[in-house]
């Protein structure tokens, strides 16, 4: 069962700023769900709840398939394991009810506490960069609602995730448990410090931008490990860090825009 590990330090764990794409598809999916509900109301206004839920689930499933094919595969994501994970994880379960009609749109969405769930393409891109095979232990900096952790859990053996906002961390644990994920451990803490007692990690993913790559996270990356992290202040780039034979190699992948990481890394600056 997922557990929330209490921890007093704090970090920032939000996702990229929203884009403008995907709103039309969100409206269409929302309309489809509403139409299903209206159709299943009988003359007295009583609803067949089971059939409505079944039609909603089918609508969400089709939306997931469309999301993967149109937003992710079409943009060059080719790892079939990542594509299958994105098809399987029910993204609508990781957003507030008021935004579920837009759960599979091509944009980030608010999840409360001034935090967001990442654009699906960014989730897939960063996950693919980790080259997960199935037996890895992964550290995530920024749990949010738990969506990225759920995707990682489909691809790795064990996931450790750190979140800044206590209520968000607790809600993520509830959602992950409800969705059947029992290999994810969540902590409320400072992502700059990582999770030293669980290190080393085979892969690390960071979802807020530090001005430089935290040395403590590099130190917790195991031999042959890979870390994906947005780096910079106003201008940011997504950087892949690889550790091999004691050497660190960095590759710049693409420009991005994330909110800054807070906590001890800002104190040190």
Image (cartoon, grey):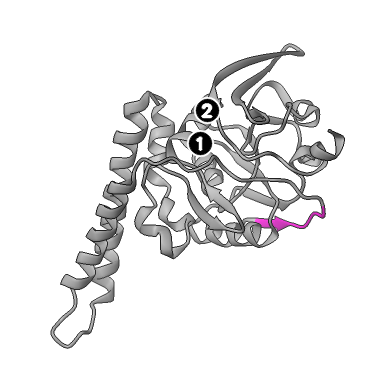
Q: Position of residue 35 (x, y in %)?
A: 20, 65
User: In percent of the image, x 13 and y 85: which residue is there?
Assistant: 43
Position of 264 compared to 43: left or right? right
Using the image, tell me which numbered label, if any, was put on residue 48. none
Real-space Cα distance between discs 1 and 2? 7 Å
User: In percent of the image, x 83 and y 41: which residue is there?
Assistant: 264
Q: Position of residue 257 (x, y in %)?
A: 56, 33
The residue to which callout 1 is attached is 155
Furthest-front residue in view?
A: 234
Residue 6, placed above or below residue 13:
below
The residue to which callout 2 is attached is 133
Position of 141 compared to 85: left or right? right
Residue segment shown in magenta: 3-8
Furthest-left residue in view?
A: 43
* Image quarter in which the N terminus is found: bottom right
Residue 35, placed above or below residue 181:
below
Residue placed most toward the observer, 10 or 7: 10
């Amino acid at each position: 069962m997922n557990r929330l590990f209490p921890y007093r330090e704090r970090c920032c764990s939000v996702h990229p700023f929203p884009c403008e794409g995907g709103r039309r598809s969100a409206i269409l999916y929302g309309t489809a769900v509403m139409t299903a509900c209206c159709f299943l109301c009988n003359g007295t206004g009583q609803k067949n709840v089971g059939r409505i839920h079944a039609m909603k689930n089918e609508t969400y499933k089709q939306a997931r398939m469309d999301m993967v094919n149109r937003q992710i595969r079409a943009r060059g994501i080719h790892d079939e394991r990542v594509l299958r994970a994105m098809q399987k994880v029910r993204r609508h379960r990781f957003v507030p009810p008021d935004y579920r009609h837009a759960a599979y749109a091509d944009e980030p969405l608010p999840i409360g506490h001034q935090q967001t769930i990442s654009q699906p393409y960014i989730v897939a891109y960063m996950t693919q960069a980790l080259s997960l095979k199935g037996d890895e232990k992964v550290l995530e900096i920024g749990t949010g609602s738990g969506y990225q952790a759920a995707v990682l859990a489909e691809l790795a053996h064990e996931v450790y995730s750190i979140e800044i906002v206590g209520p968000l961390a607790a809600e993520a644990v509830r959602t992950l448990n409800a969705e059947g994920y029992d290999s994810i451990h969540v902590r409320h803490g400072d992502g700059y410090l990582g999770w030293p007692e669980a290190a080393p990690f085979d892969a690390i993913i960071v979802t807020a931008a530090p001005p430089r790559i935290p040395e403590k996270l590099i130190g917790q990356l195991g031999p042959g490990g890979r870390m994906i992290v947005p780096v910079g202040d106003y201008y940011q780039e997504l950087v892949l860090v690889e550790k091999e034979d004691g050497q660190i190699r960095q590759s710049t992948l693409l420009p991005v825009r994330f909110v800054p990481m807070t906590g001890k890394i800002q104190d040190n600056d």
